[in-house]
């Protein structure tokens, strides 16, 4: 059985992870440009200063996407490439690059899905307080307005923020990502609130300035808990656990999605964070809660739970359970239960904005990259997504992470997530077996699964 007509098949990327060219054509610095220079922060001291050199090789990369058959491509725009100081003077060279990229995609009949923020916050704004500054939502809205005014004659699909759980939590609470801060809980919550407010103001800016009818979404992490059995009590335990906020950290779903889609923070989260919550006017929630056309979800993780007298109880994975090269457990059912639980709760069409695996890939003696594990992984996961769609949960598209091997944040070039192999010294690209397999998936709209 195939996926619905018009289902979008593609892959995703982020500007800092593949563009390179950090010093070219008037680009300003981002927090990642500075963070990677700090000793010990990145695996083997690597940086994204060249990355995949996509800035210069975008036409070759789009040709490879066309060869695979993508109908959509999700990419992000570098905020400091457009506004070197984060606000104020516009950099024409930055806009010109995204003009060329969008035009190349459209010529290849690939629909661009643009993410406005995928973590490369302008350094000049960071030293003015960054996401803690109460002006930060307006800074972001100004940037969104500029991008939309310039590209919306050709771009109609937008994501505002990518994974606030990561850039807020790993960047401002754990210190593992740029800008490398370890704030207290109240400041961490203020950063998160300001980021959600920025999302809402960006949605308003897109609606007000788009030259074509805009379809707008948001791309948090979204990972369902899997019921250990199909008993109703286990399913309900998994549903409860999926949206529970139990820890004073960033790793949950509802804190980051309920305000956006339902207009309020979850009550259990308010209890957990208690008097650490920042004060804000009720009107903030009205701004955050803007009508969306779809909800994007980046789904990699899951766990099993069963019902118990004390609430959902996690069930340990058996010894030897399969894991990816990144040590993430392989749990295909998460791509069934995530669309089911999230569609039931939020009643928005879903797009899987990221899903994929890191694999131990290299060029074999026959000159090809045989990533059989990735092919198997995607087969298992997409069959579960197909099951969810067949059960009536509305899913509009799937973007594999990632289009090509790239700079994996604090892990440098260690992890290979791509459909396309990249030799980072020569910049040679090579379609992996998974890319050729994915081509058949797209050509048959999933019927060959």
Image: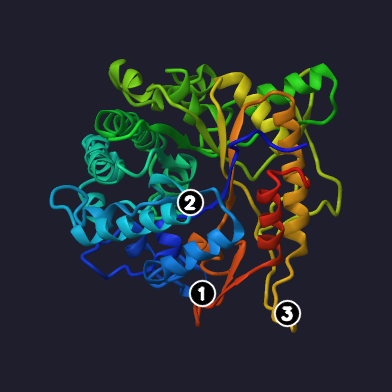
Label of residue 44 in the image:
1
The secondary element bearing badge 1 is classed as helix
Q: Which residue is identified by label 3?
A: 364
* Mark 3 vs 2, N-terminal side: 2
Which residue does the image show at 51% across and 74% down from the upper left? 44
Cα distance in 3D space between marks 3 and 2 = 32 Å
Q: Nearer the viewer, residue 320 or 175?
A: 320
Q: In this view, does 142 lie to the left or right of 384?
A: left
The secondary element bearing badge 3 is classed as loop
Is the residue 271 above or below the residue 420 in the image? above
Q: Position of residue 67 (x, y in %)?
A: 58, 62
Q: Nearer the viewer, residue 175 or 16?
A: 16
Is the residue 54 above or below the residue 143 in the image? below
**What colour scheme does the image use?**
rainbow
Whether residue 331 is visible? no
Q: Where is residue 133 in the image (x, y as percent from the top left)?
A: 24, 39
Picture quarter containing residue 69? Answer: bottom right
Q: Where is residue 224 in the image (x, y as percent from the top left)?
A: 66, 33
In what quadrant of the picture does the N terminus appear? top right
Numbered disc in front, either 1 or 3: 3
Q: Which residue is identified by label 2?
A: 109
Cα distance in 3D space between marks 1 and 3 = 24 Å
Q: Nearer the viewer, residue 186 or 147?
A: 147
**Residues packed near mark 2 inside 10 Å, few (<14), some (14 to 19) or many (20 plus):** some
**Residues packed near mark 3 inside 10 Å, few (<14), some (14 to 19) or many (20 plus):** few
Q: Position of residue 124 (x, y in %)?
A: 21, 54
Cα distance in 3D space between marks 2 and 1 = 39 Å
* Mark 2 vs 1, N-terminal side: 1
The secondary element bearing badge 2 is classed as loop
Numbered disc in front, either 2 or 1: 2
**Residues packed near mark 1 inside 10 Å, few (<14), some (14 to 19) or many (20 plus):** few
Which residue does the image show at 66% across and 59% down from the upper left? 326
């Amino acid at each position: 059985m195939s996926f619905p007509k018009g289902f979008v098949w593609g892959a995703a990327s982020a500007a800092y992870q593949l563009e390179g060219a950090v010093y070219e054509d008037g680009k300003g610095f981002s927090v990642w440009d500075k963070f990677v220079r700090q000793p010990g922060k990145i695996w083997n001291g690597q940086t994204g200063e060249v990355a995949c050199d996509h800035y210069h090789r975008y036409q070759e990369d789009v040709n490879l996407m066309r060869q695979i058959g993508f109908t959509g491509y999700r990419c992000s725009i570098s905020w400091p490439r457009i506004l070197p100081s984060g606000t104020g003077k516009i950099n024409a060279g930055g806009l010109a690059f995204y003009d060329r990229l969008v035009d190349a995609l459209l010529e290849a009949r690939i629909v661009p899905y643009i993410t406005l923020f995928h973590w490369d916050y302008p350094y000049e704004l960071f030293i003015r307080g960054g996401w803690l500054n109460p002006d930060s939502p307006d800074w972001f809205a100004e940037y969104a307005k500029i991008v939309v005014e310039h590209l919306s004659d050709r771009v109609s699909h937008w994501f505002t923020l990518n994974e606030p759980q990561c850039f807020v939590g790993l960047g401002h609470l754990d210190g593992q990502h740029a800008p490398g801060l370890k704030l207290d809980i109240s400041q961490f919550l203020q950063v998160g609130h300001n980021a959600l407010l920025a999302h809402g103001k960006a949605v308003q800016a897109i609606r007000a300035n788009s030259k074509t009818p805009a379809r707008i979404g948001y791309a948090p992490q979204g990972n369902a808990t899997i019921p250990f059995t199909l008993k109703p009590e286990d399913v309900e335990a998994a549903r409860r656990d999926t949206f529970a906020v139990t820890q004073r950290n960033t790793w949950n779903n509802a804190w980051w999605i309920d305000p956006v889609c339902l207009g309020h923070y979850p009550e259990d989260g308010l209890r957990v964070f208690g008097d650490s919550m920042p004060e804000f006017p009720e009107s903030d929630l009205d701004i955050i809660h803007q009508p969306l056309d779809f909800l994007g979800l980046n789904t990699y993780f899951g766990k099993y739970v069963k019902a118990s007298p004390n609430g959902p109880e996690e069930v340990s994975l058996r010894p030897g359970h399969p894991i990816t090269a990144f040590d993430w457990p392989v749990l295909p059912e998460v791509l069934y239960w995530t669309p089911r639980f999230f569609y039931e709760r939020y009643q928005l069409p879903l797009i899987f904005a990221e899903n994929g695996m890191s694999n131990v890939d290299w060029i074999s003696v026959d000159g090809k990259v045989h990533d059989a594990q990735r092919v198997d992984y995607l087969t298992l996961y997409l069959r579960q997504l197909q099951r969810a769609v067949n059960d009536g949960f509305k899913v509009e598209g799937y973007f594999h992470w990632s289009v090509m091997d790239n700079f994996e944040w604090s892990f440098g070039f260690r992890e290979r997530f791509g459909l396309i192999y990249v030799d980072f010294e020569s910049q040679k690209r090579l379609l992996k077996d998974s890319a050729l397999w994915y081509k058949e998936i797209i050509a048959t709209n999933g019927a060959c699964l």
